[in-house]
Image (spheres, coloured by chain):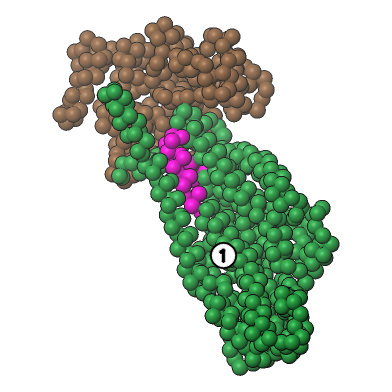
Chain colours: A green, B brown
């Protein structure tokens, strides 16, 4: 038993290395950072239970219905004079009051004659407009706000009808006094469709790209960092550095090899995920099972990728992978052996995870400028954002992202080549150790 | 004899504070085997690495066949070949494929590539084992194939860091003979070793290094005579002791 403890002690000591702990610590910091950002952004925007109501009826019933909404913790912005277009396209109303961005996401129209018609026991239509400005989780969540709000109003109306004890009221009216017509507005284009169907379609089309990209970036980076660390650990790099070949050829060969591997892996993952998503959604989003109404709505909203969109998206993803490879190459140069290489990849994981989660959860157009700048400075934000931006016809952001990714990649390739052209590739670790 | 290598006041600092070499000067001629000896950390490997173009000198000048290392490193690499002390090879490649891969890096000429591989095969000796992966080789066999790779291109200057390290007596003797033979054909050989007996029998001239500087240069016989020593080991001990007590 004593010998077992001696061995156990040695094994634990071997495992308690900075290379093991640093990545874990960074992961904790990443999630704390993401959590903090999400929390502060949620506080800044005041949550998502906000709704703008165009009260065309301006009656006692509509007023009290909105009071009920407020009582149910909805933040209601009531407009009696504004119409839908002015609410969407203008930033201020006629009295100079600012239309908060968030209010314009969920718009409910209470029609003129709402109270009178209901008291005459006629079913009423509410028009519910979801203004989609991004496809993040927060946007998907806000599309549910309207459903909850109309349910509260309906409940209120039913109670009113029962309390007033109207003689002509039928059971059917009591059960369903309101019908809700769902609409989606994207880029000032409108379609009568359930926003959840649109979000489900877009999610099925765009969700797997960041997941695949995330996996490919980490995988490709690991390939290249391990390749360099392997050369160092097995002392083959020293020999390679003395043969008559251009140092930039050394860098390029490693990068292209890892890039090709990443491309193959990306294609395999994409096919796997398409198949997986098809299985999960039962074909919804795959095209062949979409009903005509949804297809027409998607075309009407412009939510269809054109060939040029696929090219731009592919380019953004490819440059994202290349940027990861270039960063990994520089990080790999610091590695002394394969064990230390695994720890060195941590900063890259951080750079990939932060935009991945924030893009998934937040609407980048609505976040604070500081966080926005930080996110856009990370090259991997751009490929994550490419598909949603292309669906929203935001070509400016996508092209700017591609230019930025290209510059980022070139700068890191330059650094990597300089490292290999100098003796730093062999001495950098040595220097760090001596300094410490 | 024509001069192949000239090292003049070579200095190398790691960072700003750690001096590895503090003014190393020597010359190596064609047909000559020149050895660097010294204790661990004396600066032997750093000197070899700088000449092999993988470390950048802090100051000083190195010329190989009249070409300055700071200006024409790419050209110099065509004429040198370096065997690091703990060099490894690609374990997933067969011995033959490794030699072919290295030959392709030196020349685009197919016939030359074949000639290089044939030369290496001859040096390696165990032709049948060349079809096996290097990962299956013993330490001695790996060392031999690396040495074969170093010599196959017939470099003008072979830089060998502990060439016989890890080899058994018979293999070490074989390698020493090979080095001698290559030097006779005109190759200049710069090597370092801890094996004083090897150095004494192999080298034409010896430089004793310590603390990043050369303290003595001479033929083994001349140094033994100067220090009244029976062998090079005693010369080495005397020079290093003297160096530590600041005799110079």
Q: Quadrant of residue A158?
A: bottom right
Measured as percent of width and height from the top left, residue B239 is found at 21, 22
Mark 1: few, some, or many residues within 10 Å (few <14, many ≥20)? many
Measured as percent of width and height from the top left, residue A2 is found at 26, 24
Q: Vertically, is B212 above or below A48? A: above
**Is residue A338 within the magenta segment?**
yes
Image quadrant containing the N terminus of chain B:
top left
Residue drawn at x 74%, y 87% is A167
Closer to us: B246 or B31: B246
Closer to us: B41 or A339: A339
Q: Quadrant of residue B58?
A: top left
**Is residue A412 within the magenta segment?**
no
Which residue was labeled with disc 1?
A362
Residue drawn at x 82%, y 65% is A293
Measured as percent of width and height from the top left, residue A8 is found at 33, 29
Q: Vertically, is B66 above or below A92? A: above
Asked if one can make out residue A364 in the rendered structure from this viewpoint, the answer is yes
Q: Residue furthest bottom?
A: A95
Q: Residue furthest right?
A: A292
Closer to us: B132 or B218: B132
Measured as percent of width and height from the top left, residue A12 is found at 34, 34
Q: What residue span does the magenta drawing correspond to? A: A329-351
Residue drawn at x 55%, y 77% is A72
């Amino acid at each position: 038993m004593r010998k077992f403890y001696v061995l156990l002690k040695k094994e634990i000591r071997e495992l308690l290395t900075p290379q093991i702990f640093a990545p874990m610590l960074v992961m904790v910091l990443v999630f704390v950072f993401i959590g903090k950002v999400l929390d502060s952004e949620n506080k800044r925007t005041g949550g998502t239970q906000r709704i703008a109501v165009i009260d065309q009826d301006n009656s006692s019933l509509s007023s009290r219905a909105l009071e009920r909404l407020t009582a149910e913790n909805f933040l209601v912005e009531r407009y009696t004079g504004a119409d839908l277009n002015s609410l969407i396209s203008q930033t201020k109303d006629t009295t100079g009051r600012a239309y908060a961005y968030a209010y314009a996401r969920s718009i409910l129209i209470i029609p003129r004659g709402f109270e009178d018609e209901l008291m005459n026991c006629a079913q009423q239509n509410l028009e519910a407009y979801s203004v989609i400005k991004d496809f993040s989780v927060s946007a998907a969540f806000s599309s549910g706000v309207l459903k909850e709000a109309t349910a509260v109003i309906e409940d209120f109306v039913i109670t009113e009808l029962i309390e007033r004890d109207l003689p002509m009221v039928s059971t059917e009216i009591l059960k369903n006094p309101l019908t809700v017509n769902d609409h989606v507005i994207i880029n000032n284009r409108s379609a009568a469709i359930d926003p959840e169907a649109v979000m489900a379609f877009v999610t099925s089309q765009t969700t797997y790209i960041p997941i695949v990209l995330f996996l490919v970036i980490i995988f490709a980076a690991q390939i290249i960092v391990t390749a360099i660390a392997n050369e160092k650990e097995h002392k083959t790099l020293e020999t390679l550095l003395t043969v008559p070949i251009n140092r930039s050829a050394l860098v390029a060969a490693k990068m292209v090899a890892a890039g090709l591997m990443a491309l193959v892996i990306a294609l395999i993952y994409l096919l796997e995920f398409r198949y997986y998503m098809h299985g999960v959604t039962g074909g919804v989003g795959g095209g062949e099972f979409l009903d005509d109404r949804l297809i027409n709505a998607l075309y009407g909203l412009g939510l269809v990728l054109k060939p040029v969109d696929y090219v731009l998206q592919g380019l953004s993803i490819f440059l994202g992978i290349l940027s990861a490879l270039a960063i990994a190459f520089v990080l790999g140069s610091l590695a002394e052996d394969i064990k230390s290489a695994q720890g060195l990849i941590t900063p890259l994981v951080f750079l990939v995870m932060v935009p991945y989660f924030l893009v998934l959860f937040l609407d980048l157009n609505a976040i604070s400028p500081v966080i926005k700048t930080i996110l856009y400075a990370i090259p991997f934000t751009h490929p994550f954002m490419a598909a949603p931006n292309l669906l929203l016809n935001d070509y400016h952001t996508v092209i700017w992202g591609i230019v930025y990714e290209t510059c980022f990649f070139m700068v890191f390739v330059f650094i990597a080549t300089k490292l290999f052209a100098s003796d730093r590739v062999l001495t950098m670790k040595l220097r760090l150790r001596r300094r410490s | 004899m024509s001069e192949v290598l000239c090292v003049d006041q070579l200095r190398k600092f790691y960072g700003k504070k750690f001096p590895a070499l503090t003014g190393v000067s020597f010359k190596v001629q064609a047909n000559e085997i020149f050895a660097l000896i010294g204790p661990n950390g004396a600066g032997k490997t750093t000197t070899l690495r700088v000449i092999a173009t993988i470390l950048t000198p802090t100051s000083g000048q190195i010329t190989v066949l009249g070409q300055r290392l700071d200006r024409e490193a790419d050209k110099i690499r065509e004429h040198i070949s370096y065997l690091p002390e703990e060099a490894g090879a690609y374990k997933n490649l067969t011995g033959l494929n490794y030699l072919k891969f290295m030959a392709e890096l030196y020349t685009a000429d197919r016939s030359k590539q074949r000639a290089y591989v044939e030369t290496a095969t001859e040096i390696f000796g165990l032709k049948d084992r060349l079809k096996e992966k290097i990962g299956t080789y013993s330490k001695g066999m790996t060392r031999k194939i690396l040495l074969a790779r170093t010599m196959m291109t017939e470099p003008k200057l072979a830089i060998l860091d502990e060439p016989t390290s890890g080899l058994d007596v018979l293999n070490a003797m074989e390698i020493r003979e090979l080095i001698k033979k290559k030097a006779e054909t005109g190759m200049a050989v710069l090597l370092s070793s801890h094996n004083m007996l090897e150095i004494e029998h192999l080298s034409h001239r010896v430089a004793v290094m310590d603390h990043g500087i050369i303290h003595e240069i001479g033929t083994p016989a001349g140094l033994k005579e100067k220090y009244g020593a029976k062998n090079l080991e005693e010369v080495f001990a005397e020079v290093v002791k003297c160096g530590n007590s600041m005799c110079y």
